[in-house]
Amino acid sequence: MYSFDLKKVVPLGGLTCLFAKATLDESSLWHRRLGHINFKTMNKLVRGNLVRGLPSKLLENDHTCVACQKEKQHKASCKTKTVFFLATKDETSEILKNFITGIENQIDQKVKTIRCDNRTEFKNKIMNEFYEMKGIMREFSIARTPQQNGVAERKNRTLLETARTMLADSKLLTTFWAEGVILLAMFKIMC
């Protein structure tokens, strides 16, 4: 690499202006300073020498500005997944009631419909009274047809298969399967 002192260069005719490329750190710094404007516009500012202090180098876009990527998304990058582990099916009513109440408080909207399989833990006196009190409509799938709730079934299958793979790879005991599933659910939320 050579360095030149351009002040001592005597031009022999027309002047030619050469632009060097700025480093990625410098590019991202100016991208942030100028309010996250796009790099095409920033390079127009460089060429026109329109911003005092802006280096006379072409600025490179390495597409790593997390803020730009995040804010340009128009809908959530992934759906939230919540996982509960129950020792017995009797715990379902209390956990589901607490979950629905918590969700309603967090997002300040009412749960209107709940879809679940046609099992007794979702169809019992306690749950019927709770749904009626809250005004929640219920949709039940036909017994032994997981295809009717394909999205949830697929998520469960993916989480369990991946948790088994993680446990096998890490050589942990299978008693840690619940922790593996929780970890994966958190990874999936973060995408």
Image: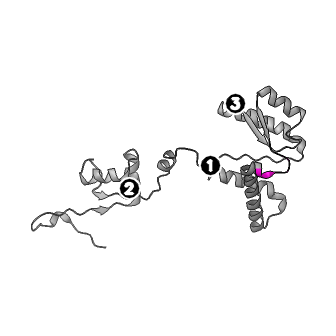
Q: Residue furthest bottom?
A: 1
Residue drawn at 76 percent across, 61 percent down? 161
**Crowd class of label 3 (few under 14; some 14 to 19; many from 20; radius 10 Å):** some
Residue 163 location in percent, x, y? 75, 60
Whether pointer 3 and pointer 2 mark residues with C-beta atoms closer than 8 Å, the reply is no
Q: Nearer the viewer, mark 3 or mark 2?
A: 3
- Classify mark 1: helix, strand or loop: loop
Identify residue for label 3.
Answer: 110
Residue type, numbered disc 1: Cys
Residue 128 location in percent, x, y? 85, 32
Q: CA separation, marks 3 and 2? A: 46 Å
Number of the label disc, if any, that sits on residue 27: 2
Q: Is residue 98 above or below residue 34?
A: above
| Number of residues whose C-alpha sits closer than 10 Å to that of mark 1, classed few (under 14), some (14–19) or many (20 or more) | few
SS class of the residue under badge 2? Answer: helix
Residue 75: image location, x then y, percent:
56, 44
Q: Which residues are magenta?
A: 142-147
Q: For the N terminus, which image quadrant?
A: bottom left
Report the amino acid beneath label 2: Ser
Badge 1 is on which residue?
78
